[in-house]
Image: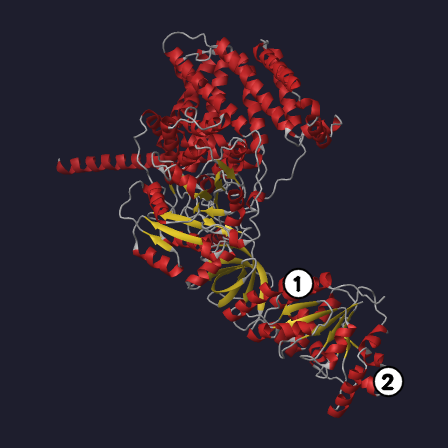
Amino acid sequence: MRRLAIVSICGGVGRSTLTAMLATLAARQGRWSLLVEWDPRPVAAWAMGARHGGREGLARAALDQQPWEAACLQADDGTLLLPFGRLTPSEEAGFAWHMAEEPQWLARQLDQLDAPDDGLLFIDTPTGPSVYQRQAVQAADAVLLVTRADMVGTVLLDQGLALAGERPVAVVINELDITRPSQNDALRRLRAVLGGQLVPYPVHRDEAVAQAMALNVALPDHAPKSQAMHDLHGVLAWLQRWMPSDQRT
Amino acid sequence: MLRGAWDRLLRSVKKRVPQDQRPWWQRVFLRPTAAAAGSASQPAVRRRPARAARTGFIDRAVQRLGVDATRLGQHLERWADHGWLRSSPVRWLLVVAAVFLLWATVTTPLDWPAQLLLFFILWFVALVVRRIPGHLPTLLLIALSMAASTRYGYWRMTQSLDLDAGWETVLGWTLLGAEIYAWLIMVLGFVQSIWPLKRPTKPMPEDRSTWPTVDVFIPTFHEPLSVVEPTVLAALGMDWPREKLNVYLLDDGRRDEFHAFAQAAGVHYVRRPDNEGAKAGNLNHALGISQGEYIAFFDCDHMPTRSFLTSTMGWLVGDDRCAMVQTPQHFFSPDPFERNLDTFRRVPNEGKLFYGIVQDGNDFWNAAFFCGSCAVVRRAPLEEIGGVAMDTVTEDAHTALKLHRKGYTTAYVNITQAAGLATESLSQHIAQRTRWARGMAQIFRIDNPLFGRGLTFMQRLCYSNAMLHFFYGIPRLVFLTAPLAYLFFELHIINAAALMILVYALPHVVLPHITNAHINGPHRHTFWAEVYETVLAWYVALPTTLAFLNPKLGKFNVTVKGGLIEKEHFDWRISRPYLLLVLLNTLGFGFGLVRLFSWNTYEAGTVLLNLVWTLYNLAMLGAAMGVARERRQIRTAHRVASRLPVCLVYPDGSTYVTHTEDYSLNGLGVMAHQAPPMQAGETIEAVLSTGEEEHAFPMRVQSVRGQQIGLAFIDLTLEQRKALVQCTLARPDAWLQWQQRYESDHAVQGLQEIVLLAVQSYSVLFQVYSRAWSEGTRRWVQRRSFLARSRRGTS
């Protein structure tokens, strides 16, 4: 099982949605695929289709001293989802304090998983540096930084790369709108700066993603020939070639 | 009521089946042309079902003999690399043995059964050797062909020249002269292409700051802006440091819209006060006002790919003595042969032999010459020889000759990095080829490569071959009319028994064909060379002779590019010489039949031989006339059939990823299996990629035909047009797949196709004449009856 932590330095770049789509695509290709929503804001779970989510989740189970395997959900195409769980703000603050005290907590939990060697584990994190992000990076084999091809993305690039710590990091561009010259320029600049670290398949802005989300249909079912699907295939294939194998076994 | 029902039935049937108006015997035997089938809007590329590869009986025989061709080839290569073959006495011994063997082969007389047996042995050996891969089998085939042809030549010169005085001698020696010319060209051709160099690209140094400055010259005279603009935009997009690339638009037409375009695009606009020296003068004028260390030349319609400079400059930068790098000139639109004979992308066109094999062979001997376009030249040597040569109308070859005389080397990189428009009509094509022929004859006269200093022996041979090639006019005409000497006048211009002629000539004809097919393979299909030469023979005969006798005769006539053929017509003016030859040959055939059955039954063999020769001539002439039948061109921008990935973006933001079937600078043809339905008139955006960057283009849906959608670009800005050129024609891989679509060369099928083409041409001719005849007769009858009536009226 190879673990990928997905981070972002600016908000609203579509990180959670992208993570959910990658996990779905990996499951469609026949792999064991788990999405761990390590983010108090439940966007990834909602993007995966868990619309009427209950309170269960990884953090909820930890706080309630319950086994968290029971909180795992499975979509009908085989994608596994481990939501964060519903926490009140004070519970959340306390949980974050606990996580700061135990930086290896998530890694220990995930080590207990029994998964095949070619399985993929995606860990979604909140925006920017946070205790959850640090835990996820600790637990992962590689880090994927999601950014947009705009001014903020280029300005904050170094800080974004720093989020990955010592883990190998790749950068993927999301919601690319090539009709805007500023985005084309930013893309060129990022390519020049990052070289082989940039995933060569930027994910284009595509209305089909929002449509699929609104209809609560997986994107491969809703628009299999769309540009976004085409890009996601490329990104997933590139990640599978690039990600280092599991160092722990 | 019944009749009404019958009419309705007929109408419904006729609507489904395209109207084929030809007479029944044509419909049975000949396939419909695009025009006859009523589909004038057919795309330029018609794909035929691929012929399955058949293992001929030769292959099976080879297998049964237990010969593994590939292993044998490897054995031969290893054997040739042995050290003892390199020692001098061994080589001299081999040369002496070879000369003796050749003398024995050529001069030993044989009676006809033995000669026939020899032919069959040689033929079988050649067919077997052909299948062994590697280079040594090619040399072996060349040796066999030269031996067979020389044997024929010896027999011809010693046994068949016992001619009566008078016309027989004159015509006999003329035929012999034509045959000697053909033999000379064959030998020079073999020697020239004996080892194609196939030079790879040499990479430029890593440090781009050391790269030199390059000027790009794009001369234009009266071509429209729509033809020149993509070339300028493609040149601007070449991968080279921006500050070291200068594009010059050399406008001899002194047009203001070109000036405005140059300013908008950011290129230099050069206008000179006169048109002295035509294109060469234009280039020399620009040479004087620019400073780049290297100069890239492009004709105004030859669009370079992005990687043109990075693929070619490597050889120039690394070697001080290298003065020029030439690349192939490729045409993405069909030339008159390809369009009118429907061979586009199935059979290699006339120019492919030159750029595919001949220049590669020249490169081995350091004799690759400049072709005027798609090349880069170093400035210093060019200025040393006084700029582009202005003494002849083929200024390019003459310039290269002068460079070679000064001791510089040239290079040929056989990777297509630019493409342009072919000549639009047969008359333009002939005008262009005539100009080349005239120019080459002029150079042969005023700066003969066989004499003068500075050239190596092989360079002299290569240049002479290139120039002598253009003298094929008169020999070809001789071959087309030679059998008539016997059929009309009973002159035995080859004074030998028909049987002997047959058995001696067979190896001479068959073996060089096999060898040429082996060497030229993908670049020229068998028998098509005859068609190309037949079409041009009449027109190059006179100019080359005149230019050879007096080089100052002949003005530069510019080749027109970018015209449009309005409607299908038969170019009568151009075909008059062919018609004359067809008439003569048909009469000869008639005479021959009479001779066969009553006058000359005692020498039936001779009559038969001449009849077969006449039939062959008629087939070639028929195919030549097929070229004069100009097909209608309906598009203003030529389409290129190519698969490019494209993403269609709908107005609501959703997308669909697919590929193009073809593209042009006006629009795209896109495959859309499961796309959301579109209707004509809708606007969408299409996203194309240059390979590294993506660009979106606004488009309108023009037509929806099943799964194929036709889109047209809407009002592109200059920046968008530049991006479009980079996404389509200027991609480094744009032309690399072209060769793969050619059908493989099957001699018999090629001949069959040419014969069918000839039959088609003759039937069209017959139709036109019979229609004209009946029209004429009708008018004559009308006039007579009118006159009779008026006489009755007055009386």
The correct choice, above or below, for B113 with respect to B68 in the image is above
Q: Earlier in the sequence, mark 1 or mark 2?
A: 2
Q: Quadrant of residue A237?
A: bottom right
Spot occupied by residue B696 in the image (x, y as percentages of width and height)? 51, 65
Residue at image mark 2:
A66
> Local crowd at mark 2 within 10 Å, few (<14), some, or many (≥20)?
some
Q: Is residue B575 left or right of residue B112?
A: left
> How far across and how far down the image is residue B307, in percent?
53, 51
Q: Position of residue A218 (x, y in %)?
A: 69, 73
Residue projecting furthest to the bottom: A90
**Is residue B675 visible in this depiction of the protein?**
no
3D distance between C-alphas at marks 1 and 2: 39 Å
Q: Nearer the viewer, residue B335 or A203?
A: A203
Residue designated by label 1: A234
Judging from the image, mark 2 belongs to the subunit labelled A
List x then y, in percent, for residue A109. 83, 77
Q: Which quadrant would the C terminus of chain B be assigned to in this image? A: top left
The amino acid type, in three-letter code, at marker 2 is Gln
Q: Is residue A201 above or below residue B383?
A: below
- Which residue does the image show at 45% across and 27% down from the upper left? B464
Question: A144 or A36, which lies in front?
Answer: A144
Q: Residue at x 51, y 15 (%)?
A: B153
Nearest the viewer among B436 and B448 is B448
| Disc 1, SS | helix
| Residue B389 visible within the image | yes
Local crowd at mark 1 within 10 Å, few (<14), some, or many (≥20)? some
> Which residue is rendered at x = 57% and y = 76% of the image?
A152
Q: How many marks?
A: 2
Subunit under mark 1: A
Horizontal placement of B379 versus B732: left or right? left
Q: Amino acid at mark 1?
A: Gly
